[in-house]
Image (cartoon, rainbow, N blue to C red):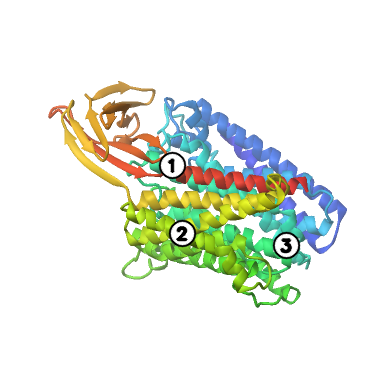
């Protein structure tokens, strides 16, 4: 089975290599023959890699442990759904999964743009085939998911318990989709440069893909945070871990790219910025893979040491140099007036590009510092305080501009008109901030963040209200591109409130009690029950039922637990969470001793944290709303 799977993925690599050669030749000399056979090999590549992927999933599902990858990431007791998710749980499988996604997207794009010019298509599919071929090169010659052992093990080693969570089913695929779909926008940008076509045509052609990329990347990042929140047992959702940062970096440049592309499309401005931002986004997606899989950084999410690093660095350099070469050769065609009024949409978009890029750079610096300094006697690194300190001013300005920008017109405008538009939001900000200060929330930094967020909230709501008042409720559907953007900004504001509240006003307690005793915490009484031990499919569960009372009234029984997996000696905490709009009660079984008859409970109250997930959902809905409007046009 392994040899057949390898043969299919090897033939998939050959197909992508032939497509690269044919489309590379067609970029120089238009040829219907090259285009016809190049397209054919793209589809053959997709079919072959799809079959190879099915074989790997079948091997994972049926426990064919002779394949080393299957033996490393599954065992016979693992639930079926997690056996399937083993496809992307390990290094070799995830790279094959990534390449397969590019191949599928290439085939979809081959149907979508089949009537486009030959040279333009050649540039697009040259870049796409090169990208998919790179991943298949790795899975064929560096980290082969179909490698067979010399013997047939009786059982596998099993999956890392941290990955045995529903988050494993949706977080990696959505993140990979976000990375992969940006490859399509990158390929179109590359093709436009190769063809010396600097019109906004490529931006328009890829707008749907670009927004979809951003949506999946947003979902992937936030679900990753939600997964960490429920699985890692520390009450947080973002720790500035290098691998977390690696997913955030392309999101920052991708978000800037989407804003810059609007100016490119509507005003023929920020052209170079738009090209640079899609290049950065693409390369940061690849760079994130390098960070995760090369073993150059220490992270709870990384795949360990490997020989992949030099291949990624070489690919990043080659694609980056090639893109920049064609970008420079097009500079003379992209001259534009560089003066923007700060109090205009153009000015705000220009500042937004700088803010997102600068924020990306300071996070990139902190993330790569251990790599940059490893040649020196003392390897340097930075922690959470660094990231919080350097990123907070940028986030504050981004939130402020997200509310300010929709109210500003294109071109120059009178300051009196701008003030007239903004003063209601300013008054709302002052009133709201004063109220929460009086209510007892007096910490300076969250107060400032709350003020900026409230300003943006009111400007966004004001914009929506004025639009509906002038044009009726139907304007939300007729101009859903604008209102999709406003919904995204509204979601960002909601998410920001959740981040501010949960970051600065969470409370916790650690108590060791005997079964039957009660812990008083915040507004709750927690009555701790006897330990219960139960054997499950592939682990033993130890938990303590905790009855929760609020103001003397019974609310719920929560069950924080520890799990002892069959193939792992370490206990893993499974937290219990009771969610309400005003906050989560978060319980951890911190310790226990049967002989001493004691149980250690850690309780945390995370105010308004559920609004982070709700804010993300609103942002996604806003993005989808914008795409559908584009389709109707």
**Marker disc for residue 265:** 3
Whole-Å distance between the Cαs marked 1 and 2? Answer: 23 Å
Q: Which residue is mark 2?
A: 429
Residue lying at the far left in this picture: please name it: 596
Q: Position of residue 366 (x, y in %)?
A: 41, 64
**Left or right: residue 199 compared with residue 539:** right
Mark 3 surroundings within 10 Å by alpha-carbon count, few (fewer than 14), some (14 through 19), many (20 or more):
some
Return the residue nearer the eye: 463 or 80.
463
Q: Nearer the viewer, mark 1 or mark 2?
A: 2
The residue carrying pointer 2 sits among few (fewer than 14), some (14 to 19) or many (20 or more) residues within 10 Å by Cα, namely many
The mark closer to the camera, 3 or 1, is 1
Residue 352: x and y in percent read: 57, 65
Residue 157 screen position, x and y as percent: 40, 33
On the question of residue 631 being in view, the answer is yes
Q: Which residue is mark 1?
A: 610
- Where does the N terminus fall, quadrant-wise? top right
Label 1 crowding class (10 Å Cα cut-off): few <14, some 14-19, many 20+? many
Identified at 52% across, 60% down, the residue is 425
Determine whether label 3 and label 2 are within 8 Å by CB. no
* Residue at left offset 58%, top offset 51%: 488
Mark 3 or mark 2: which comes first in sequence?
Answer: 3
User: What is the distance, in whole Å, between disc 3 and disc 2 at their CAs?
Assistant: 34 Å
Q: Of 280 and 42, which appears nearest the observer?
A: 280
Q: Residue at x 62, y 51 (%)?
A: 464
| Left or right: 463 in relation to 561 | right
Q: Which of the two discs, 3 and 1, labels the residue nearer the N terminus?
A: 3
């Amino acid at each position: 089975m392994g040899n057949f799977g390898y043969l299919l993925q090897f033939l998939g690599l050959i197909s992508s290599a032939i497509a690269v050669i044919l489309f590379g030749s067609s970029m120089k000399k238009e040829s219907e023959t090259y285009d016809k056979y190049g397209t054919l090999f793209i589809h053959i590549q997709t079919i072959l890699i799809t079959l190879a992927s099915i074989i790997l999933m079948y091997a994972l599902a049926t426990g064919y442990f002779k394949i080393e990858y299957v033996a490393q990431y599954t065992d016979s007791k693992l639930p079926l759904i997690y056996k399937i998710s083993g496809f992307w749980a390990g290094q070799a499988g995830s790279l094959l999964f990534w390449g397969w996604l590019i191949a599928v997207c290439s085939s979809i794009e081959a149907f979508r743009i089949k009537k486009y010019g030959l040279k333009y298509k050649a540039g697009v599919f040259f870049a796409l085939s090169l990208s998919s071929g790179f991943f298949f090169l790795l899975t064929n010659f560096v980290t082969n998911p179909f490698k067979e052992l010399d013997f047939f093990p009786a059982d596998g080693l099993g999956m890392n318990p941290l990955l045995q969570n529903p988050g494993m089913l949706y977080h990696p695929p959505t993140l990979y989709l976000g990375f992969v779909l940006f490859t399509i926008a990158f390929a179109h940008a590359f093709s436009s440069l190769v063809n010396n076509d600097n019109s906004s045509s490529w931006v328009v052609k890829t707008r749907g893909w670009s927004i979809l990329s951003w949506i999946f990347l947003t979902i992937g990042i936030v679900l990753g945070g939600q997964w960490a929140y429920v699985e890692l047992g520390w009450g947080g959702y973002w720790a500035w871990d290098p691998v977390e940062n690696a997913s955030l970096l392309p999101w920052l440049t991708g978000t800037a790219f989407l804003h810059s592309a609007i100016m490119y499309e509507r005003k023929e401005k920020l052209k170079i910025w738009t090209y640079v931002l899609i290049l950065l986004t693409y390369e940061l997606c690849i760079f994130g893979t390098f960070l995760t899989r090369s073993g150059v950084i220490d992270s709870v999410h990384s795949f360990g040491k490997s020989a992949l690093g030099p291949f990624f660095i070489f690919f990043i350099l080659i694609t980056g140099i090639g893109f920049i070469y064609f970008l420079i050769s097009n500079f003379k065609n992209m001259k534009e007036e560089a003066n923007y009024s700060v109090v205009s949409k153009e000015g705000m978009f220009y500042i937004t590009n700088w803010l997102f890029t600068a924020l990306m750079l300071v996070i990139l610096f902190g993330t790569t510092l251990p790599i940059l300094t490893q040649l020196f006697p003392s390897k340097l690194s930075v922690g959470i305080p660094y990231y919080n300190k350097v990123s907070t001013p940028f986030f504050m300005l981004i939130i402020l501009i997200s509310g300010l920008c929709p109210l500003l017109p294109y071109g120059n405008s009178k300051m009196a008109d701008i003030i007239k538009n903004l003063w209601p939001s300013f008054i709302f900000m002052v009133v709201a901030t004063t109220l929460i200060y009086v209510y007892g929330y007096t910490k300076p930094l969250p107060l400032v963040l709350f003020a900026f967020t409230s300003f943006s909230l009111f400007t966004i709501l004001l914009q929506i209200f004025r639009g509906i008042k002038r044009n009726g409720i139907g304007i939300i559907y007729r101009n859903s591109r604008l209102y999709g953007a406003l919904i995204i900004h509204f979601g960002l504001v909601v998410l920001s409130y959740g981040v501010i509240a949960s970051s600065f006003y969470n409370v916790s307690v650690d108590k060791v009690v005997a079964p039957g005793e009660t812990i008083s915490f915040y507004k709750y009484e927690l009555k701790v029950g006897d330990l219960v031990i139960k054997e499950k499919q592939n682990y033993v569960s130890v938990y303590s039922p905790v009855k929760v009372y609020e103001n003397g009234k019974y609310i719920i029984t929560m069950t924080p637990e520890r799990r002892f997996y069959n193939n792992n000696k370490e206990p893993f905490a499974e937290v219990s969470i009771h969610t309400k709009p005003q906050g989560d009660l978060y319980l951890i079984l911190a310790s226990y001793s049967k002989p001493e008859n004691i149980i250690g409970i850690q309780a945390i109250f995370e105010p308004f944290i559920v609004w982070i997930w709700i804010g993300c959902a609103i942002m996604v809905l806003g993005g989808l709303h914008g795409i559908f409007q584009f389709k109707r046009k």
